[in-house]
Amino acid sequence: MKKKHIMDAKGIERALTRIAHEIIEKNKGVEDIVILGIPTRGVHIARRLSHIFKTIEGAALPVGSVDATLYRDDIGMKEVQPALKRTDIPVPIDNKKVIIVDDVLFTGRTIRAAMNVIIDFGRPANIQLAVLIDRGHRELPIRADYVGKNAPTSMQEKVKVHLKETDGVDEVVVEE
Amino acid sequence: MRLKRKDILAIEELTKDEIELILSTAESFKEVSEREIKKVPTLRGRTIINLFYEPSTRTRTSFEIAAKRMSADAINISTSSSSVVKGETLKDTARNLEAMNPDCIVLRHPSSGAPEMLARLVRCSVINAGDGSHEHPSQALLDLLTVKERFGRIAGLKIAIAGDIAHSRVARSNIHGFAKLGAEVSIAGPPTMMPSEIEKMGCKMFYKVEDAIRDAHVIMVLRIQLERQKTGLFPTAREYSKLFALDSKKLEHAAKDVVILHPGPINRGIEISSDVADGKYSLILEQVKNGVAVRMALFYLLMGGSRE
Amino acid sequence: MNRLLIKGGRVIDPASGIDGLFDVYAVGGKIAAVKPYEPSAFSLQPNDWTVIDAAGLVICPGFIDMHTHLREPGYEYKETVQTGAMAAAAGGFTSVACMANTNPVNDNASVTRYILKKAQEEGIVNVFPVGAISSGLKGETLAEIGELKEAGCIAISDDGRPIVSSGLMRLALEYAKPFNLPVISHCEDAWLAIDGVMNEGFISTKLGLKGIPNAKEDIMVARDIALAELTGGRLHIAHISTKGAVQLVRNAKQNGLNVTAEVTPHHFTLTDEAVIGYNTNAKMNPPLRTKKDIDAIKTGLQDGTIDAIATDHAPQNSDEKDVEFDKAANGIVGLETALPLSLRLVAEGVMSFNTLIEKLSTNPAKLLGLDSKGSLKVGADADITIVDLNKEWVVDAKELKSKSRNTPFDGWKMKGRVVKTIVSGKVVYEE
Ligand SMILES: [Zn+2]
Ligand SMILES: [Zn+2]
């Protein structure tokens, strides 16, 4: 199995800092922003973003998690049922700017499901998407507002984001 | 950890890991039930049949709500309301239902083993919603979840079950469930209501309620079927309530933070005194909420995978 | 006049004390001679003799099942005299005693004659009807026992249900005496564990099924033995299943009472664990018991407390078995699996093959007063079973000759099989 490192700890940190700045710029501040990570690693990235906002803006943003499992379009098609994760929307999201955070953007199906979950919780002013890696191969008309790194891949390749919180190390590798 | 079963027929056949998976999945579903929109599209297009050969509004409603919250189509068939079932053998009913292409059948039946028989006859999943004196797995799972939420654990807790153990499917499922998760289970009731060799199931047997509930964290009081008096299992309701009902005096033997679970409609003054029933010990509302969550979890775990 | 020679087999006949290589000659349906093996005998195959080469096989007196339910008249959808007889022949049984719980009940001579006529026309083995003890099996008044005997009944029994009234049982044991009819008792106390469906114990507790304690049988066996002592009557305990009942019969025999007993192959083969999974083919009455009961039964077979092995062959239609366990009918078909299950006892060292033949043939003939059967003595009926003790085979319920398929032994690997069954010198079954 071939393994290719495409990002290290430094790279991840730089990318997230840049994304944070882009979010502030685009939203003209951090007012009314709610960050919702997609479990598991999206939640950790969301927390890191929140931490960066705190150092830049001095304000902690509400961070939650949105598990899209129950809204997936392939339930019953996989051999075994996908494990359920936590959904935790910390504040009412009506008229809020919701930023969905995930580690890798691939087909776009998970993001579609996550948006459905969010909409069942209320009517946000808008929903934005921040991802660490965009590996292409979209199957739905979805694009990210904030991208840490574009990593063109083949369908056979696997993009793995490892984070200290879950994997003990910060890195992004492409496996074949 | 995944559930790879076609059916949920008995707690006895579930492993500790499987029970824990169901409970943790149910915890996730509890959150869904607290949302503004209590409905997720997970089982859209799936058909769940609630086939009830015994009246049970509580259990049937709980399964029905669980199905609907997951966007499945729930169809209720009960012996009293349907010609599909009247006078027809279970085998023929199974064939007829199979033709409707359901994804899951929830069966309540007065004969022990009927769900196991149905499961052999149909391709879809079968959930036992109570069979004879055998098991009532979803009830035990919701009791486990309720106790786990209250105490943060099951292992090491002392559980006492009082009443007609011999005829109780709830007792059997709970003895298996709590014992598997490491609790210490005691049972109590008149000897006429203790089935043969019950202790081999992993519990201690007492004839005096006081002895069984000593230091207990959880007391489960089974509903006494008053018809049983006719078969002479106890002389009179008066004597039963005097000797075996849970009242505040007996309750002094239990742990300070004891909670009381009751699986069905209460016979006030017979198996439980009114002051205890109305006291601070009851977790009935939690039991109802957890019942829906556990049943959603079962639906999800049985139908969320393809099993192919 | 048919002439049959069975050559070169190991002949075992406990009644005449024979065990060795012999040639058996049968003429006109009777045993004509049993001579030491002579390889050259009839090597020319004279055309008026049928010659069977039994080299490597065992030749024994035909098996006699003291306890069969042929279901005719009334329940022909479960079994008929014809299909039951075919199943018997396939199992090596040359005679069967058929129980009276038919519809109408065999409680009068006309039903007995009907069964015998059917047997003569269609039955390929000997059929000996058992008459009812009580009229209509109602347990109220005696059936016409004298006439039943005259018509051809060889025993009386209300099998399927107990004689609840001790008074009636006393009368039956007394009244049957001059007719030399054994009174076969289906022993269960009617008032204990009324709605039980399986053995009472840990398995019934776990499955949530109503239990039947051993005491249900023991109480009735004890009562019947007391009545046998009171009356001097001839008591035979059907399908013994409990340790306690074995001990009671042992004591009765030691006390010189005329009490005998039979056991079914399933009661010494299976325990109540066979019910797990709500297997309705493991539902019977008396129920399958526990290992300690099986051990007691084996000891009882060894020391002669239990005289006979009988099948309690009870065919049930699949509609009566493919239902919820508590609604399912009792009983299993047993004729075609009795021999290989019994041979397991021989393999285990519980008894010799010779003793097994006594339990399957010699003793049942004695108990039922069938003087010309159960032996290969000269002049006896030429009812002969030829067995391959080493033949390995697998039970396939679909292949059974019985009209019903209710066996818990489907798919079981067996060792030992009936190769030929001969009734009155004629081969009625060939494997
Ligand atoms: Zn019987
Ligand atoms: Zn019988």
Image (cartoon, grey):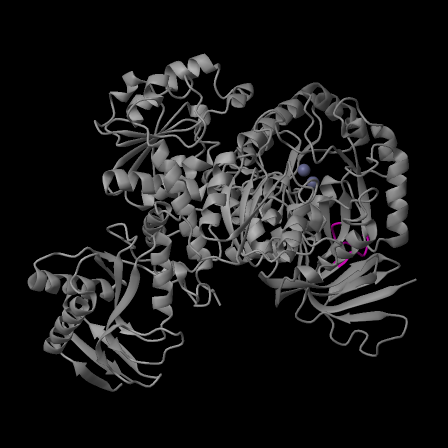
Q: Is residue C357 magenta?
A: no
Instruction: State the residue at coordinates (24%, 76%).
Output: A133
Q: Is residue C116 left or right of residue A31?
A: right
State which region is magenta: C374-384
Percent across and percent down for residue B291 are 40, 41
Query: Given the current orientation, which residue lies at the most extreme front position?
Result: A28
Outermost residue on the right side: it is: C1
Q: Say whether residue B25 is visible.
A: yes
Q: Position of residue C398 (x, y in %)?
A: 69, 61
Residue lying at 65% horizontally and 48% vertically, measured from the top left:
B93
At x 87%, y 54%, the residue is: C122
Which image quadrant for residue B170? top left
Foreground residue among C3 and C193: C193
> Regarding ligand 2, which quadrant of the image does it lie in?
top right
Q: Nearer the viewer, residue C168 or B103?
A: B103
Pinpoint residue C159: horizontal percent, then vertical percent. Answer: 71, 35
From the viewer's perspective, tell me whether residue B268 is left or right of residue C146: left
Frontmost residue, C408 versus C3: C408
Q: Is residue C210 above or below residue C390?
A: above
Quadrant of the rendering where the N terminus of chain B is positioned: bottom left
Q: Is residue C129 left or right of residue A108?
A: right
C90, C28: nearer the viewer? C90
Q: What secondary structure is the stretch in magenta mostly built from? A: loop
Magenta stretch holds residue C375 = yes
The image shows a total of numbered marks equal to: 0
Residue B23 x %, y %? 34, 48
The residue under the point 43% across, 43% down is B138
Q: Is residue C359 visible?
A: no
Q: Quadrant of residue C240?
A: top right
